[in-house]
Image: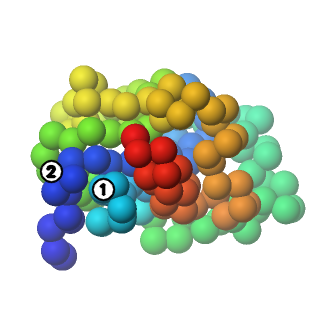
Amino acid sequence: MDKPDNTSKNLILNLETLGNSYDSIILQAGMCYFNESSILSTMCININPTDQKSYGSTSDINILTWWKQPENINIYKKFFENSHNVEDALDFIDWFIQDEVNVFCQCAFDYPILKSLYDRAYRDCPIKPLLLKDIPTLLSYPISAYMNYDKSFNTLDNCKNQVKILQSLNV
């Protein structure tokens, strides 16, 4: 696998989870490197929820119930396709990030949940807190304004949508 193009040092991170607490199960993690005009490299990985439970990850019953509704269940099942155990998923994320980069995300949500999984796996998170850039603060938008609500719930699609918005604002 080729090394990701991280020459811009700008990365978008987006998670789909089964809760809002720091120890929530991560269904999928999406990331992409970008510059002022293009997306340079992307990654998207499904992380096995059952394996995460062995690390102390939890789910919110209300969110789980929502996912299991007939109109959502097929999307929910896709998160289990080609899902990776925690160690392999974290290895892949480590490989993708590699260097110190600016990480654009929902800093009060994405980062603490991912960092918590790293902590519970007794590993160092490759994301440096001082390099976090909070998308809602930067854009002065409500979250719903920049999330891709096309009902795919694909984290990589959301990352690409957020990149377009950041590029249009020259952030």
For marks 1 and 2, the one nearer the N-term is 1
Which residue shows up at 67% across the image and 64% down it?
152
Question: In x, y percent, where is residue 120?
Answer: 32, 31
Q: Residue furthest bottom?
A: 1
So how many labels did they put on this image?
A: 2
Please name the residue that numbered disc 1 is placed on.
35
- Is 9 above or below relative to 81? above
Please name the residue that numbered disc 2 is placed on.
98
Instruction: Name the residue type under label 1.
Output: Asn
Determine if residue 17 is in view.
yes
Which residue shows up at 20% across the image and 64% down it?
5
Q: Which mark is residue 117?
A: none
Quarter of the image where the N terminus is located: bottom left
Determine if residue 55 is in view.
no
**Cβ atoms under marks 1 and 2 closer than 8 Å:** no
| Discs 1/2, front | 1
- Is 125 above or below relative to 108? below
Instruction: Name the residue type under label 2.
Output: Gln
Question: In x, y percent, where is residue 141?
Answer: 62, 33
